[in-house]
Image (cartoon, rainbow, N blue to C red):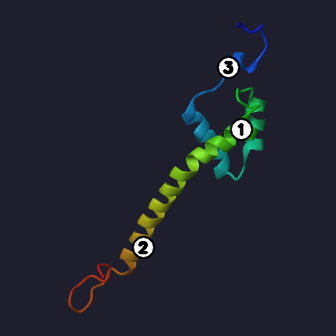
Amino acid sequence: MPLPLGSGSALVERNTDCAVNILFVLGFITSGDGGKEAERILGLLGLPNYTTMEKRSFTTIEEHITGPTQDLAKEVMFENLSAAVEKHFAGRQQDGVLLFDL
């Protein structure tokens, strides 16, 4: 059944670019802000999705990127820790074995 002109959210053009939305939310998380601030910026700029950003989109995207973000953080921390330990224990024992290898 066709909708009358100007009615229903099906007629509202939406931003479906996932990468842009993820970077937008990640930027607000990084700066310590949340969905309300993200919603305000979208609204002030006249961009789509501002009415659902705080209540639905921000949380959904945040939940979607939490796992991969934590995995990446753990990987980077482990690499940095390994490099620091290797640098600290760069010396050798009397038998020539690297302390790092122990």
For image coordinates 42% across by 73% down, the residue present is 84
Q: Which label belongs to residue 39?
A: none
Q: How far apart are marks 2 and 3 (CA)?
A: 51 Å
Circle 1 or circle 2, nearest the eye: 1
User: Which residue is depicted at the point 72% across and 47% down?
Assistant: 34
In the picture provided, is 49 more to the left or to the right than 19?
Answer: right
Which residue occupies 68% across, 41% down?
58
Residue underneath mark 2: 84
Return the disc, 2 or 3, that comes first in the chain's sequence: 3
The residue singled out by tag 1 in the image is: 56
Q: Left or right? Give the position of 92 relative to 86.
A: left
Image quadrant holding the N terminus, namely top right
Question: Which corner quadrant holds the C terminus?
Answer: bottom left
Residue 13 badge = 3
Q: What residue type is labelled 1?
A: Arg
Q: Is residue 3 left or right of residue 83?
A: right
Disc 2 secondary structure class: helix
**Crowdedness of circle 3 by 10 Å Cα count: few (<14), some, many (20+)?**
few
For this orientation, the residue located farthest to the left is 95
Q: In which quarter of the image is residue 86?
A: bottom left
Q: From the top left corner, tell me how far across and down residue 10 is, in percent.
A: 70, 18
